[in-house]
Amino acid sequence: MKQPTYVDGQMICAGDRIKHAGHPAVVLAVLDTREFASDRDRAEWDFLKDGFVILEAGTSETYHYQKADEDIELVSRAEESC
């Protein structure tokens, strides 16, 4: 399985802080590599097989993407980079 990447070619990692259409967000799961930001996220998203899941900050809005587009931009890496 190939790890998803941002438009600029950098790998997407669980825990990355991003902008989603200009709004702060975090990557909860990278499904292709079975990487999850927490055990809770693993239990919630493990049924999906590929892509990645993000959570917009300050909301309960989650989004599942197969591939990143120009609306998803890396702000900073997770403390434990992938």
Image (cartoon, grey):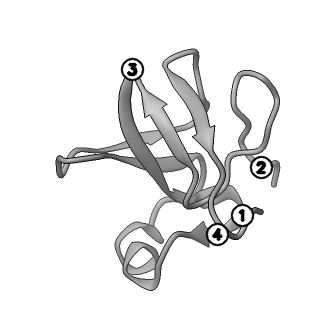
The CA span between labels 3 and 1 is 25 Å
Which residue in the protein does label 4 denote? 34
Which residue in the protein does label 2 denote? 3
How many residues crowd around disc 4 within 10 Å: few (fewer than 14), some, or many (20 or more)?
A: some
The CA span between labels 4 and 1 is 4 Å
Q: Which of the numbered marks, if any, corresponds to residue 33?
A: 1
Q: Amino acid at mark 3?
A: Ala
Under circle 2, the secondary element is loop
Q: Quadrant of the N terminus?
A: bottom right
Residue positioned 59% across, 60% down in the render: 14
Q: Nearer the viewer, residue 52 or 38?
A: 38
Q: Quadrant of the C terminus?
A: bottom right
Mark nearer the N terminus (4 vs 2): 2
Q: Which of the numbered marks, if any, corresponds to residue 76?
A: none
The CA span between labels 3 and 4 is 25 Å
How many residues crowd around disc 2 within 10 Å: few (fewer than 14), some, or many (20 or more)?
A: some
Q: Is residue 74 above or below residue 44?
A: above
Residue 80 in picture, x, y percent from top left: 70, 70
Which residue in the protein does label 3 denote? 21
Residue positioned 82% across, 29% down in the render: 9
Assess whether mark 2 and mark 4 are in contact (beta carbons under 8 angstroms): no
Q: Amino acid at mark 4?
A: Arg
Assess whether mark 1 and mark 4 are in contact (beta carbons under 8 angstroms): yes
Residue 21 in picture, x, y percent from top left: 39, 20
Image side of residue 45 versus residue 66, left or right? left
Residue positioned 71% across, 22% down in the render: 7
Front disc: 2 or 3? 3
How many residues crowd around disc 1 within 10 Å: few (fewer than 14), some, or many (20 or more)?
A: some
Q: Amino acid at mark 2?
A: Gln
The CA span between labels 2 and 3 is 22 Å
